[in-house]
Structure formats: structure tokens, C-alpha cells
Amino acid sequence: MGAAGSLEMENRTTDPHGMRSLRPNAGMRTRRYCEHCQIRDRALCSALSSPAASALSEIAHFKQFPAGQVLQQSHQDPSWYAVIVSGVVKLVKTLPDGRQQIVGLQFTADFLGRPFAASSAFRAEATTSLLLCCFPKSDFESLLHEYPCLEEALLRRALDQLDSAREWMFTLGRRTAREKMASLLFLIAERLARSGRERTPEETQIEFDLPFSRTEMADCLGLTHETVSRELRELRERGVIGTRGRRTLVLPQLGALERLAGGEQLEV
Amino acid sequence: MGAAGSLEMENRTTDPHGMRSLRPNAGMRTRRYCEHCQIRDRALCSALSSPAASALSEIAHFKQFPAGQVLQQSHQDPSWYAVIVSGVVKLVKTLPDGRQQIVGLQFTADFLGRPFAASSAFRAEATTSLLLCCFPKSDFESLLHEYPCLEEALLRRALDQLDSAREWMFTLGRRTAREKMASLLFLIAERLARSGRERTPEETQIEFDLPFSRTEMADCLGLTHETVSRELRELRERGVIGTRGRRTLVLPQLGALERLAGGEQLEV
DNA sequence: CGTCCACTTGATGGGCATCAACCGAAGTGG
DNA sequence: CCACTTCGGTTGATGCCCATCAAGTGGACG
């Protein structure tokens, strides 16, 4: 799927962004659609008082982006905050010499933006096609001062992200390539399966499209894309994962993956 | 310095904890001492409205801990929040198989505690002798609901910590042992020098005691203590750092260290 | 059908872990 | 006061995991 081709994809009849029969266009006001929003119960707005929530909906509008789009260059002023309705965003740090590390992944219902700083030190980039619920920067910051519950909701999310980041620091520092790979696949499976789109309840085996290229997975894990490729093969040959094409992953047993990620050896 | 011996040390005439002539004892009320507090302009309380600040001072009390003391076991209920008056705290994740990674470092004026969660997934441990300004858990949480400015102050700090954690993720994933070592020493130098105790303004070269053992530094960097030892020797032989004893570090040129940390090669 | 690009697979080597021995300072007990 | 122990740290020898370099594969697309 090329970056240019994905905008049209969003307007298919079977909407991949989970807005039911709605087909939002860039700039559309959210206000009257919040009631249909599928992430309403999980996103930032779910934690707000009802006046705060409706004030937020007043300033919200949808925006679409194709895969690969840079949402926010590092050290540049952002013009909006957002909640991810669907799609995946990576936060990347790149050095002049080309070394690169993905330092954050944001999935459906996650918050995008860095309050209280002129800019972020990291580049935000869409790894899949994206639907965002955006809030203009200054409007959002006004609400932040007006409604303490909004600050509390952001604080809760920031602390959760901090915990996740620290867990990932362990993975980067102390796990082997095999374990890193299993950790990442497990994390992706949890986030994508939980989003409700890729998994129907009666399915025992999980199946979904990887939102990342091999190189992006390597950049998550502090590895090379060659090593990622080799480890995927190894996992496939051991029956821990299955693949269909390059992007589709089949997980017959999430538990095996989790054990491998935790550091235990597979008894085969 | 043994763990048992350091409590007495805190009561020397030249107080290492920066409370001037005061010699606080465990349980002492802070209220009347806030005006003398040396971190008053940098800690959490500096960002609060004056009613919030005085409410906070009402519930504060000092507490001392020796080096090596576990402040908070992972997955256990904490009984207080705190601000570090002096000393260094590490946040550690340990696996049953013994693998260990330090996922956070807290220095003077940093906040300790994990609001909105029953417990933290990480163990908090003093790496040096410690003076904390503690707030009983439930009292502090009441203030959190009462004063939005307290939530905002915590949010700002959480976001800063998140940025730091992400920067460190790059170090763990993409830097060499040499660069990791330089990054850590640079980070420590910045935090300890900024605290104002180890550095007088007219000094061109910085000198301070490392708050970590070789093993702890290795646990920060995802290395072994042998590699840390070797890299320190290498840095010493190249003149980037100097050492006196095992714990005292002399940095004649902070810039060289920063360049090494950034990934540039030393032109020697 | 040719080109492109993500990905795969193989060969080789280096950076860092691992294992092991040694050192020196601090504590301990006779 | 001195042997003995302990423990953090240093240094060396060896090996392995994963990076690097290189070539090949297959699907997408013009």
C-alpha cells in the first residue's frame, strides 16, 4: 500500500476507521457525530465531566492522513492536539548519522501532542492510514485551563505512557533479539485486538495486519531489519506465529508469544 | 560507606542535605522550615498557588534513608509521596532470572510516587543516603482533588519524565557502549552540578562523587559491570574524564563528554 | 516485461557478554 | 594488631549474538 493510494481507501463503503456508516472528511465538525464515535468510551473525552466533554467536542474536527505522513516534525510548533480514532502513529528520534529509534507507539484512542512545551523532541509519523480527531492548539489549551478534569485525564495518560516507556526500556536494555521480537508482536496484538476491529469475540486465534515494515519493527527494538526478518522466520518455524503475505500475522496462541517475550525458553 | 553507617553521617555539622544549619529528624514537621528549604524554588511546591503550597507544607515531613534502602517494592502499596531534598533514587525492573534494568533516575527536587495507580511496577531504591520531604498518601491525594494547580504541576513533571525516558530509549537501543557511558556521565554531571552542592560557580572543571556503583551504571545502560569498567578506563586514558578513588569523577571538559555521547568520534 | 522496493537469506566479523583470576579497601574476629 | 573474609572493582581470555555486507527473491506497478 503506497502512501499516495491510501486516502481513497478511507472512503470505501466498509469504513476501516470504525465510524460505522459515517464517512468523515477532513475538516468535518465532530460535534454531532460524537454519539456515534466508536472510541468514545475509551478516549480522553470519556474521562471528562459532561461540560468539559461537550466543550471539547465543540472544537473537534476530523482529519485524515495517508500512511507515511509526517504529522509533526521534531522541534517544530504543532498546530493541534488530537486523539487517534484509527491507525497507528510512531514517535521517532533520528540522529544526523542516520541512526534511528522509535520511542513511542500510539494506537486507537491514544492522545497525540505535548502540552506545556513549544515543541516535542520527537517526530510523529503515521505508520498506517490515519483518522484523527483534532483540537486546535490554542482552543485546547484554553480548555486545559478551564477544566481541571481535562488536566487530570492527561495526567493519567501521561503516567500510563511513562510506565509503558519504562517497561520498554527494559526490553531494549536487557532482552535478546528473540525476546524483543516476541515482545513487540505481543504488544501490537494486544493493542490491535483490543481495538475491536481485527478480532471477533469467538475467534480463538488472532489475525491482523502488521502496522509496521520490518525496518520500523527494527527501529522499535534497537535491531536491524535483517535480524527482524530472521527472528520472524524462526518464530514461524517454531509455530509460535503464522504469516500470510508480508504484513498479515496469525497468532494461534498468544500465550506462547507472551512466554517467549517474558524470557522463558520454548520447550521444543 | 555502608548502609548502616550513613544515618549518622546525615547529622554531621556540615549537613550534606543542604538544609543549612537545620538538622531535620525523621517525622519532623516541615511547615516552619519551608522558608529555609534550598530546593523550594525548583521543587513541586514552587509551581503551586500559595494556598496550595501552604496546604502541602501542612502535611509534609522529612524522612531520612540510608543508601541501598528500598523505598518502595514493586507491586506494593506505597504509603507516601515525596520530593527528594537530596540524594539519588533509582527505579528498577527486575526479572525472576536476575536480569535487571534501571528505568528511571530521580535527583534533587524530583517527585517520587505514582498517583492514580494502586502500585508501581518498579522498585524504588536509594542509591545514596537520602533526605525526602514526604506527604502521606491519602492527604496528598485529597490535595490533588482540591487544587488543580497541583495536578498541573504533576502533569508537567510527568511529561518531562516521559521525554527523558524516550531520550534514554534511544541511548539503550542505538548507542554503543562508549556512547552510553558518556551519555550517563553527562546526565549525572548535569543533574548533580545543577543541584548546586558539588559545583561552585567559579570552577571550570566539575568534580563530584558518582552516586552509583559500576553495576548500577551497567543497569542503567543495558551493559555488564565489566564493560562499564573497561569503558571508564578507556575514557580516562583518552583524557575525557579523570578519577580519584573509585567514586570521585573529575570532568575537565564537559563538552568532550557531550560530543562522545552524541555519537561523534573523538579526534585523537 | 522491466523496474523498483521491501524483504529474505547467506557469509563474515566485531562488539560486548561471559567466565575467570586478581586486586585493594573495608570490615571482622581472634 | 594482624590474619581472614568480603565485596566492589579491574583486567584478561574466549566466544557468541547480532550487525554488516552482499546477493537473491518476489510482489507491485508502470
Image (cartoon, coloured by chain):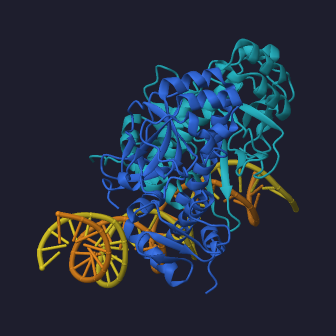
Chain colours: A blue, B cyan, C yellow, D orange
The residue sitting at the bottom extreme is A268
Q: How many marks?
A: 0
Q: Is residue A165 above or below residue B42?
A: below
Which image quadrant is residue A41 in?
top right
**Horizontal and vertical percent for residue A113?**
50, 36
- Pick the front one: B213 or D23: D23
Q: Is residue A12 above or below residue A124?
A: below
**Horizontal and vertical percent for residue B212?**
61, 46
Task: Confirm whether residue A206 shows in the render.
Answer: yes
Q: Is residue A253 above or below residue A144?
A: below
Task: Confirm whether residue B62 shows in the render.
Answer: no
Q: Is residue A204 left or right of residue A95?
A: right
Which image quadrant is residue B141 in?
top right
The residue depicted at 47 percent of the width and 74 percent of the height is A232
**Horizontal and vertical percent for residue B142?**
82, 28
- Pick the front one: A23 or A156: A23
The residue depicted at 63 percent of the width and 29 percent of the height is A54
The residue depicted at 64 percent of the width and 73 percent of the height is A203
Q: Is residue A263 left or right of residue A122?
A: right
- Pick the front one: A61 or A181: A61
**Horizontal and vertical percent for residue B153?**
64, 26
- Pick the front one: B2 or A116: A116
Image quarter hosting the N terminus of chain B? top right
The residue depicted at 53 percent of the width and 36 percent of the height is A30
